[in-house]
Amino acid sequence: MLFVEKLLSKLRTLVIDTGERYVPSGSFDELDATHTTNYIFAKQFIEGKVVLDVGCGCGYGCEYLARSGAKNVIGVDVSREAVKFAKAHYNAGNLDYIVMDAQNLAFKDRLFDVVVSFEVIEHLYNAKKYLFEVHRVLKTDGIFIISTPNKKVSSPCFKKAVLPFHVKEFYPEELYILLSQIFKAVNILGKRISNEEILMKEQEFRRSWRFKIISRLSQYDFVRMLARLLPLDIKQIVTGAGQLRLKPSDFELSTEYVKHSPCLVAILRK
């Protein structure tokens, strides 16, 4: 019976471990800070608040916020497998998970004090509908914190995003214009790696022939489809991606880094 349970758990992990969705394997403090620093940054806004995490993935961030002072946290994700994983691995008494589409939030108006949504907007075909939905469920004085790749760094000079799961990536100016159409106050920060050794390796990879070839091939639809289907291990061999465990101290967020940082983080007020 134990063998069957382990096998089912492994199969669920394979279903959600596409290389795009981060599948954690440990407590929040043990995870790669590439995925946790946004939640650590959001912590300052959630004390005693009702929080919604749109596109919560496997739940590690929801549990962190729930245990870091939030009154209640609800995590929603379109993936049933991710929500199952979250419920099984990252729980708290003031935390719940629901399978839900980010573009159709089944909540009443002005319900949440804070909404967070990290690395979601670039996956959506209707970004405006998603933003209007978040605006609708956010309280009048609410805060929305969002993150997304900076196209200037992640997919420079290419029409389509290099990563095959991304529908649309944004330049900083483009993102600001879009968000300003819906939210009255928009402040965009850049998140960059401050660890010089790791930063140099990242920059070397982006200058390499490997990255240039991958970037050009990614513009073909059949290559993008194949890349979505390949096992993660094979993708990492092709891309040369490592298994670095970055720490929160390896990152910095500032308005000074917006132009050249790989990740944009925006703080929005309704």
Image (cartoon, rainbow, N blue to C red):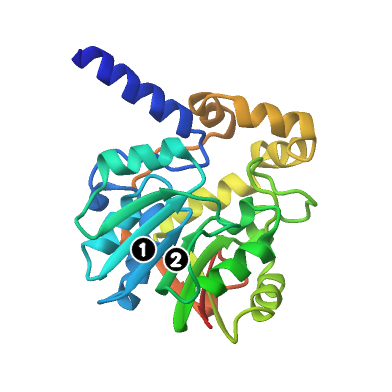
Q: Nearer the viewer, residue 148 or 201?
A: 148
Q: Nearer the viewer, residue 8 or 260?
A: 8
- The type of residue carrying mark 2 is Val
Percent x, y for residue 160?
76, 48
* Residue labelled with disc 2: 116
Q: Mark 2: which secondary structure? A: strand
User: Would residue 191 be found to the left or right of residue 3 on screen?
Assistant: right
Q: Mark 1: which secondary structure? A: helix
Q: Does 112 appear above or below 67?
A: below
- The type of residue carrying mark 1 is Tyr
* Residue labelled with disc 1: 39
Q: Look at discs 2 and 1 and give the one toward the viewer.
A: 2
The extreme front residue here reads 108
The answer to whether the residue labelled 2 contacts the one labelled 1, judged by CB atoms less than 8 Å apart, is: yes
Q: Quadrant of residue 248?
A: bottom left
Q: Quadrant of residue 243?
A: top left
Percent x, y for residue 13?
39, 29
The residues bearing labels 2 and 1 have C-alpha atoms spaced at a distance of: 8 Å
